[in-house]
C-alpha cells in the first residue's frame, strides 16, 4: 500500500466514522460536513475511474471544477453555521460567490484550475481561522478538546493552508513526483478529524 492508498483509506475511515457519529452530532454544521465527505469520496473514486479510461484512450469528463465548486461551497456553508459575527458571514458568502463564478469560468479556461484551488484553499484557511478566533474568545474554549468543529478546523488548516505552496508550484512540475506530499497532508488532516469524531462529546445547545 503506497501513500496514495493510505490517503484514500483515511478518507474512507473518516466517512465511515461520520456515519456512526450521526446521533452524537445533529447540527447543520455536521450535516454539511457529511455532504462534504461524500463529495470528496465521489471525487476520489471518479478520478480513479477517469484515470483508467484515459489510459485506455476512452473519453473522460472533466469533473474537477464541479468537485471544487461543491467542496469549497460546502465548507463555506459549514462555517456560516458556526461563525456568529454577521460581518464575517457576509465576507464568507461574497468569497463563495466569487469562487463559484471562478469555477464556472474554469470549465472554459482549465489552465486556471490550479489558481481555483489556491483561491479555495485561501478561503477555507480564512474561514477556519475566523472560527478558531471566535472560539478562542468564547466560553467553549474551556472544552475545546471535546469540540468537533475545533478538530475539523485544525485539520482543514493543516491541509488547505499547507497545500498552497504545492499548488503554486504545480503548473511548473514535470511529473507527479511530489504529489505524495498532498497525500501526506490529507492523512494528517484526517487524523485530526478522526480524533475529533472519536473524542468529541455529544452536541448541546448553548
Image: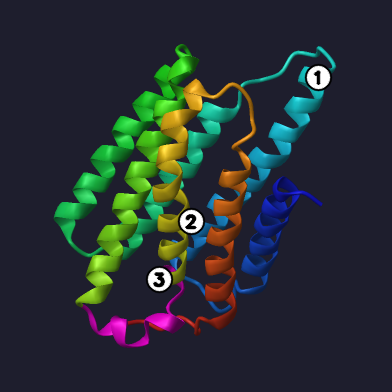
Query: Could one spot residue 112 in this view of the protein?
Result: yes
Q: Nearer the viewer, residue 84 or 178?
A: 178
Task: Evaluate if marks 1 and 3 touch, with contact meaning CB atoms under 8 Å apart.
Answer: no
Image: 194 above or below 6: below
Which numbered circle lies on residue 55?
Answer: 1
Residue extending farthest to the left is 87
Query: Could one spot residue 39 in this view of the protein?
Result: no
Which numbered circle lies on residue 150?
Answer: 3
**Residue 205 sits in which quadrant?**
bottom left
Report the residue at 39% width, 27% height from top: 115
Task: Evaluate if marks 3 and 2 touch, with contact meaning CB atoms under 8 Å apart.
Answer: no
The quarter of the image holding the C terminus is bottom left
Task: Evaluate if marks 1 and 2 touch, with contact meaning CB atoms under 8 Å apart.
Answer: no
Nearer-N-terminus badge (1/3):
1
Q: Dot 2 corresponds to which residue?
A: 32
Nearer-N-terminus badge (1/2):
2
Q: Is residue 41 magenta?
A: no
Amino acid at each position: 500500500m503506497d501513500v496514495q492508498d493510505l490517503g484514500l483509506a483515511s478518507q474512507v475511515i473518516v466517512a465511515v466514522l461520520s456515519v456512526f457519529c450521526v446521533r452524537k452530532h445533529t447540527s447543520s454544521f455536521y450535516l454539511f460536513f457529511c455532504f462534504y465527505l461524500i463529495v470528496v469520496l465521489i471525487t476520489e473514486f471518479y478520478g480513479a475511474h477517469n484515470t483508467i479510461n484515459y489510459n485506455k484512450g476512452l473519453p473522460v469528463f472533466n469533473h474537477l471544477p464541479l468537485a471544487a465548486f461543491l467542496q469549497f461551497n460546502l465548507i463555506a456553508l459549514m462555517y456560516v453555521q458556526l461563525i456568529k459575527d454577521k460581518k464575517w458571514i457576509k465576507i464568507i458568502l461574497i468569497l463563495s460567490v466569487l469562487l463559484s463564478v471562478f469555477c464556472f469560468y474554469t470549465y472554459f479556461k482549465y489552465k486556471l484550475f490550479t489558481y481555483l484551488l489556491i483561491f479555495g484553499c485561501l478561503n477555507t484557511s480564512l474561514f477556519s481561522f475566523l472560527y478558531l478566533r471566535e472560539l478562542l474568545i468564547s466560553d467553549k474554549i474551556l472544552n475545546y478538546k471535546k469540540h468537533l468543529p475545533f478538530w475539523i478546523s485544525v485539520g482543514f488548516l493543516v491541509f488547505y493552508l499547507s497545500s498552497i505552496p504545492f499548488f503554486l508550484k504545480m503548473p511548473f512540475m514535470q511529473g507527479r513526483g511530489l504529489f505524495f506530499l498532498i497525500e501526506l497532508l490529507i492523512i494528517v488532516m484526517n487524523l485530526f478529524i478522526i480524533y475529533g469524531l472519536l473524542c468529541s462529546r455529544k452536541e448541546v445547545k448553548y
